[in-house]
Amino acid sequence: MMDFVRISRTEIETSRIALGTWAIGGWMWGGTEEQQAV
């Protein structure tokens, strides 16, 4: 069963587990070294 939390002062609920995707955006976001990203 997945655990959800409500974001403060909103009606938005999200799972406690999240995927950080900053570097997936490509070169516009500063790029990444492939070895560090794996």
Image (tube, grey):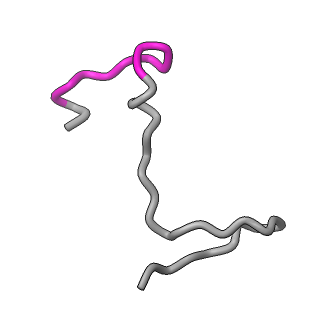
Q: In terms of depth relative to the viewer, which is nearer, 1 or 9?
A: 1
Question: Which quarter of the rendered picture does the N terminus lie within?
Answer: bottom left
Q: Which quarter of the rendered picture does the C terminus lie within?
A: top left
Q: Position of residue 13 (x, y in %)?
A: 66, 69
- The magenta span reads 26-35
For this rendering, which residue is in front, 7 or 2? 2
Residue under the point 41% across and 20% down: 26
Expressed as whole percent of the image width and height from the top left, the position of residue 10 reads 81, 65
Q: Residue furthest bottom?
A: 1
In magenta stretch: residue 13: no
* Residue 17 vertical placement versus 32 (above, below): below
Picture residue at 40% right of the left edge, 30% below the top: 23
Q: Position of residue 5 (x, y in %)?
A: 62, 75
Residue at the farthest right position = 9
Residue at (72, 65) in percent of width and height: 12
Residue that protrudes farthest toward the left in the picture: 35
Left or right, 33 with respect to 19, comes to left
Numbered-mark total: 0
Q: Residue at x 42, y 52 (%)?
A: 19
Position in image of residue 21 (x %, y %): 43, 40
Q: Which of the two residues, 37 or 12, is positioned nearer the viewer here?
A: 12
Residue 30 is one of the magenta-drawn residues: yes
- Residue 11, picture quadrant: bottom right
